[in-house]
Image: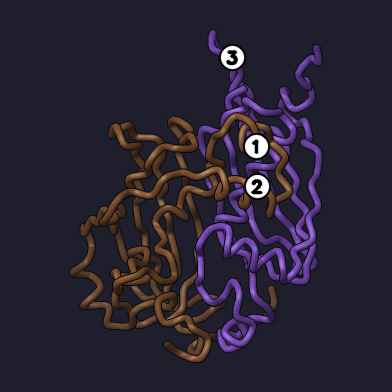
């Protein structure tokens, strides 16, 4: 583990050629699908100071929390594999990451007690672009969320920038 | 019986603005609440090494802030159908988020009303997020 304990949370570095071979790859989170738990939904609502009774009394999952079901615990007994979102795994030159757009379609709310089956599909990687954060590539990943009965509950199209901050132009502040 | 709020059902209506202090504690709580341990959300040294002035809240928190604006206004039972969110600049710890919304479209059918809301999140650094939300009432 590195000094800040962030080994698993920084993206894998590689070449664009390597990364392009990943386009079209789909991955469903392995192991038992995570369960929507009231402590989790309430913690999230509390941080937002969101008093919506749907989260506090009616046991629904706030839709903004859905992507968290694709993230691993920071440690598991027995050395279980640490699974990161696909955008972290793609071997691109940029060692850093910033989310850009998330287009979410919500078909049905998850309820506390339901399991979340999550699949990620890498749909595209852009050519190298110049951005205010540095040179990098735009990566598009489709996320789908189904419950334990296979019912499609939500879909995200997530566009993120994998970039190298050491190659940033001077930020003009505009 | 309280009648549901009528404001926000016509094009041009403004939703009630939300202000929320993005303290360092809240940013790290957001990382913990969502299990998102990307270091930019909790590690100030990492953020500085990336050329950023401070840690910043994650996308899941930002989504929740946009959703809260809409559901605070329309009440429990309002269902967000679609949310398209674009980050223009990180929302850094140490700032205050100001979340505003305005109605840009309304549709009526036999099942109820569908409202399109444009949402912005600003901080002392300027505009951080723009979003468009469709909510079913």
Task: For mark 1, give the secondary structure.
Answer: helix
Q: Give the distance between the C-alpha atoms of the residues marked 3 and 2, in whole angstroms.
A: 27 Å
Q: Position of residue B36 (x, y in %)?
A: 51, 65
| Extreme residue in the top direction | B110
Numbered disc 3: secondary structure: strand
Question: Mark on residue B112?
Answer: 3
Of the chain colours in the picture, the one used for chain A is brown
Q: Position of residue B44 (x, y in %)?
A: 64, 82
Tell if the residue under mark 3 belongs to the same chain as the one under mark 1.
no
> Which is closer to the viewer, label 3 or label 2?
2
Q: Secondary structure at mark 2?
A: helix
Lateral position of residue B129 relative to residue B85, left or right: right
Query: How far apart are labels 1 and 2 at the CA level?
Result: 8 Å
> Which residue is painted at 55% across and 47% down in the image?
A64
- The residue shown at (70%, 63%) is B26
Residue A104: % across, % down = 47, 44
Give the numbered dot on residue A56. Answer: 1
Residue depicted at 61% across the width and 75% down the height? B42
Tell me which chain the residue with mark 3 is part of: B
Dot 2: within a 10 Å radius of its alpha carbon, few (fewer than 14), some, or many (20 or more) residues?
Answer: many
As drawn, the chain in purple is: B
> Mark 1 or mark 2, which has the lower sequence index?
2
| Relative image position of residue B123 (x, y in whole percent) | 76, 63
Screen quadrant of the C terminus of chain A: bottom right
Left or right: B60 as drawn, with respect to B96:
left
Q: Nearer the viewer, mark 1 or mark 2?
A: 1
Q: Nearer the viewer, residue B55 or B100?
A: B55
- CA gap between label 3 and label 1 equals 25 Å
The answer to whether A112 is drawn above or below residue A92 in the figure is above
């Amino acid at each position: 583990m590195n000094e800040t304990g962030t080994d698993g949370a920084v993206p894998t570095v590689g070449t664009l050629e390597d990364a392009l071979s990943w386009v079209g790859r789909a991955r469903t989170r392995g192991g038992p699908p995570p369960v929507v738990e009231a402590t989790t939904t309430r913690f999230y609502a509390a941080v937002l100071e969101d008093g919506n009774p749907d989260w506090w009394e009616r046991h629904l999952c706030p839709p903004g929390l859905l992507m968290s079901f694709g993230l691993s615990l920071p440690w598991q007994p027995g050395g279980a594999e640490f699974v990161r979102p696909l955008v972290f795994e793609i071997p691109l030159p940029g060692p850093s990451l910033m989310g850009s757009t998330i287009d979410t379609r919500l078909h049905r709310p998850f309820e506390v007690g339901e399991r979340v089956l999550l699949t990620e599909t890498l749909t595209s990687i852009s050519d190298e672009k110049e951005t205010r954060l540095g040179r990098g590539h735009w990566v598009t990943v489709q996320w789908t969320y189904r419950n334990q009965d296979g019912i499609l509950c939500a879909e995200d199209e997530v566009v993120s920038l994998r970039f190298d901050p050491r190659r940033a132009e001077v930020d003009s502040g505009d | 019986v309280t009648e549901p709020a009528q404001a926000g059902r016509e094009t041009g209506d403004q939703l009630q603005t939300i202000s929320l202090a993005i303290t360092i504690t809240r940013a790290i709580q957001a990382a913990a609440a969502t299990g998102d341990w990307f270091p930019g959300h909790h590690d100030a040294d990492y953020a500085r090494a990336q050329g950023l002035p401070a840690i910043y809240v994650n996308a899941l928190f930002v989504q929740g802030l946009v959703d809260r604006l809409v559901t605070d206004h329309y009440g429990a039972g309002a269902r967000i159908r679609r949310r398209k969110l674009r980050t223009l600049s990180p929302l850094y710890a140490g700032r205050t988020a100001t979340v505003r919304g305005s109605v840009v479209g309304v549709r009526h059918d036999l099942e109820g009303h569908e409202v399109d809301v444009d949402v912005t999140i600003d901080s002392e650094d300027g505009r951080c997020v723009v979003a468009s939300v469709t909510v079913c009432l």
